[in-house]
Every structure is written in C-alpha cells, then in structure tokens.
Amino acid sequence: MKKIQIDDQTVIYKRSDQSKFYYVRVRSQQTKKLYIKSTKQTVISEARKFAEKLSMEIYKKETIGSVVDEKTFSFVAKKYILQIEDKIKNGTAKKIETEKAHIVQTKFLPFFKQTNFNAINQTLLQEYVDSRTKNLNYTISRTRQQTEVATWNALQQFAINNNYTVVKKELPKVNVAKSTKRVVFDNAQQKIIRRKLDELAKEPSKNKTTIEIRELLRDYYYLLIHSGIRTGNEMMRVRYSSFEYRNVATLSNKQQQRFFSDDQELLFCYLREGETKTDQRRETIIRTASGAFENALLNIASRTEHTRDIYEKHITQSRKACLKALFESDEYVIRFSSETDVLSLNDAKQVIRITRNSELLTKAFTKFLKDHSFYKDRNGDMRSLYSLRHTYATEMLEEGVSLELVAKQVGNSTSVLDKFYNQANVSASAYTFSGQKSDDDFAKRNMSKVDIQKKIKELKALLED
C-alpha cells in the first residue's frame, strides 16, 4: 500500500495496486480521532488537493465546535443500535435501552433513512410526528410519547458524543390521550363478548395467521380480565413458571377469598422485576372461580411448541395436575402456535417479538369491538384491551375487596384507583374503604341514608390522606 505523507496529520494512499481512487487519512490534532475518506481522484496531484482541503476543514470545524462527520441518519441509527446490542451481549443493557433500540429501528429509521443527520430540522421532525399519528385510529398514550421522546434524546446525545451533530433537535409533542375515568365492560357485555370471541375463534379462514390471531385473542381476553395484569409488555412477559398454586388463607376474610377462587388453593402470578410498568416485582392473585383463566392457559399450551408435549402427557390426569406440570416450564405464555425457539431469542429480538404480537392482538381486539358495537360507550369514550384490566379492578371494588388489596393487585396507588377507575356502588365502596366490610353480602345490609352519608365522608377523608 503506497503512502504519501502530506503533513504530520494527513496521509494519502491506495488500498491496493488494483485500487482506482486515492484515499486520505487525517488524524485530528485536538481529539486524535481518525477520519478516512475516498478522494474520488485517480491523479495524485488532485488527490493531494482534496486531502489538504479536507484536513483544513476538519481543523476549522473542530476549532469552532462544528460537526466534523457528516453522516446519514441511517448510519448514526445503526451505530446506536449496535452499541446497545453490544451491551446486551455483555449483559449490561437496561430494559429501557433495549426498548429504545427497537423504537429507533421501527419508528425513526424508516422515516429519516438516508437524510443527512445534521440536516434534520424542526420542519422535518414535525412531518415525522404528523406521519406517525395520521394513520392511527387511537390517541397515543402519554407513556408512549414519553418513551419516544426519551429515545430521540438518547439518539441525539449519542450523535453529539460522536461528533455527528452539535445541537439537540427537539422532537415535537403530539396530542396524547387525556386522563379520564376508565371505561369498563358490564356483565351483559362480557357475556356477549365471550360468545362472539368463541365463535370468531372457530370461524374458518384460508389465512393461517388470521386463525392464530383469533385463537390467541380469545384466550388473551380471559387471561386479562381475570388477572388485572397490564396488556402489552406485562402480560407478554408472563411465563408458565410465573404461576404457583398456594394452599394458604392469604386474604383477610372469606368474602374476599371467594372472589378469587371456590377452591382451597389460590393461583398466584409473580411478575418479575424489570418486567412491569413500574419495573418493580408484583404478586397478583388470579381470579379462578370460573375456571376460564386456567382453561385459557391450557388452550394456549396445547397449541404451542414444547408446552404441547407437557399438555398431552398430563391432561389425562386432571386439569390442575396438567397446570402444575406446565408451571415447571419457563416458556412464555403468550405465543402464536407457529412461533418456534422463542426462548433462544436475545433481548432485542424478544422486544421485537413482544411488540409485534401485542400490536397484532390490540388491532384485532379493536376491530372486534367495532364489529360488535362495543368500541365506544354512551359518552363516546373508547374501549380497548386495557378496559379488561379496568373491568377487573372495578369488579373487585364492587365485590367488597379491600382498597389496599385492589391497589396491590393492579400495581397502582389507592389515589390512582379513586381518580381513574369507575367506583363501586356507594354503600359497598364506603364500607370497603373504611375497613368495615363483613362476610355478608352488601345487598343484605339495610343502611339508612344517614349511614351512607357518614360512610361517604369517611371514604373521602381516607382518600385525602
């Protein structure tokens, strides 16, 4: 490789005897960073001129703190993703970093592509935001927007650190969903939904993916409405090993225990640290009185890789024996029947899988609600998969489960429950929140108006604490 020294920092050379163009290599005087570029020249005198000019440009830009490396968005984004993938391999990546890499890959990269990174301005960013929201049939949640903004800021900082840009560009905010009372499904609506989902799962289709989505959607519905686990990341990360039957008198009274199970054993689900919305561990009791939750677990297990073998081996003994055998498996519960080797995926690919499956199920359930006129309530508020969690919490309040236990179950504070969730009937809520609920059914109580008003005051005082 022939080299020609221009000065202490600059060299021009050809990579091989077959190389057509000369290349220039400049080492920064200030940062010692190495810059290598093709001169696009075949004549040595022209290549020298290019090298001298480039060396001077680098010196000037570094002196005034300007951008030295002009790169495309695609180049910078892929470098950022590779950095996170290296952290994943080393076991040092945080969950949020994996999510950020996914957002860069699936949201930012398809839009900006070959745009010069340093040329991105507020007009172009506004175009991105507009394109991001115009095709959605729902309003982006505040949490999703915050995550996307944090991802953009992290990418900008990465670009600054690597001298691809010098000034952070602010990602415009979009209109986010307003905090309102949570919309729920009443008993009559739930009955219709159950019947229609069962019918949908049995409908023939030439598209195998459609069949898989319909089958999984039916079982996903039962898992969500009987557990209060958040749809999306929380439920998608639940494994069979997350569950355990415990033969203990955990709850404070028989009324509360009967809400969850008619059996002596209660079914617990352990949500792992870093796999919940708050990143904190949570232990939640599953409502198994109807058997629907357990049936959904068995249905999915019978269709999916590895757990199918366990199901076929133990189901002839009893449902519970089969479930307990399944609880020894570390496989993820929410899987499509065609998915294979799910546990072998690295964290980044696992996030992609979870996000894709979550979006497919969310889209399918939204369509289902629209098809059966359940999408909006009388006030025009929209229902979604998340409404199943709200229904679960509301039913607990109506059945007299203590406020503290409801908050623990769904992973929220008592103030959040009061602010967002539909409240149970006045007498039931008042007694529950004041801690004076007995094992008798509320309908059997003969409360005077004075008693009710008194309990309402007690309730308000408790919530203000």
Image: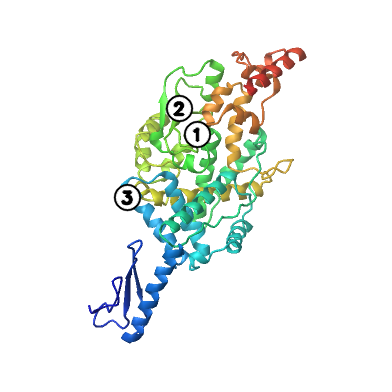
Residue depicted at 70% across the width and 19% down the height: 456
Pick the front one: 18 or 330: 18
Query: Pointers 1 and 2 in contact (CB under 8 A)?
Result: yes
Pick the front one: 332 or 211: 332
Q: Estimate the spatial distance between the alpha carbons at disc 1 and disc 2, rounded to whole Å.
A: 10 Å
Label 1 sits on residue:
293
Q: How many marks?
A: 3
Label 2 sits on residue:
267
Please state which amino acid type lies under the numbered disc 3: Lys
Q: Position of residue 431 (x, y in %)?
A: 65, 17
Label 3 sits on residue:
89
Q: Secondary structure at mark 3?
A: helix
Q: Position of residue 285 (x, y in %)?
A: 49, 27
Q: Using the rendered image of the protein, determine whether residue 336 is visible from the camera's viewpoint.
A: no
Task: State the quadrant of the N terminus.
Answer: bottom left
Please state which amino acid type lies under the numbered disc 1: Phe
Q: Residues within 10 Å of mark 1 (few under 14, many from 20)?
A: many
Would you say 154 lies left or right of 27 here? right
Q: Residue furthest right?
A: 449
Q: Secondary structure at mark 2?
A: strand
Q: Estimate the spatial distance between the alpha carbons at disc 2 and disc 3, rounded to whole Å.
A: 35 Å
Closer to viewer: mark 2 or mark 3: 3
Q: Mark 3 or mark 1, which has the lower sequence index?
A: 3
Closer to viewer: mark 1 or mark 2: 2
